[in-house]
Image (spheres, rainbow, N blue to C red):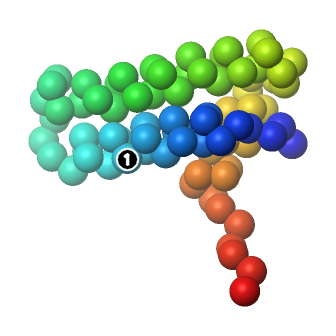
């Protein structure tokens, strides 16, 4: 599986947080703008990192989402 950078992980976390805030309130264009911007920034970063590393773009995005949305349990 692809190894995403910490930057990609942080950008995706920011997009998820923006989504949570946006969907907690009734829809407004202004209210959803931060989510759209964060998602676009993340997508651009995935494309750029995939070009630099040679990783498949889809695999890289999938790896980021797995880390953020389905983290491995911490070992004690």
Against 49, residue 26 (above or below) is below
Residue that lies at the very extreme toward the bottom in this rendered image: 76
Q: Which image quarter: residue 31? A: top left
Against 25, residue 15 (above or below) is above
Comparing 34 with 24, the one in front is 34
Q: Quadrant of the N terminus?
A: top right
| Residue bearing mark 1 | 17
Across and down, in percent, residue 27 comes to: 16, 35
* Residue displayed at 53% across by 27% down: 42
Q: Quadrant of the C terminus?
A: bottom right
Report the side of 1 relative to 12 (left or right): right
Q: Which image quarter: residue 62? A: top right
Callout 1: 10 Å neighbours few (<14), some, many (20+)? some
Q: Which image quarter: residue 61? A: top right
Report the side of 26 relative to 69 (left or right): left
* Residue displayed at 35% across by 25% down: 36
Secondary structure under the numbered disc 1 in the rendered image: helix
Regarding residue 51, the answer to whether it shows in the image is: yes
Comparing 26 with 63, the one in front is 63
């Amino acid at each position: 599986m692809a190894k995403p950078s910490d930057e990609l992980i942080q950008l995706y976390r920011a997009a998820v947080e923006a989504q949570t805030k946006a969907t907690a309130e009734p829809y407004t264009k202004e209210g959803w703008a931060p989510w759209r911007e964060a998602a676009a920034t993340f997508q651009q970063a995935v494309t750029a990192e995939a070009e630099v590393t040679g990783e498949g773009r889809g695999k890289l995005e999938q790896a980021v989402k797995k880390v953020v949305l389905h983290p491995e349990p911490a070992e004690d």
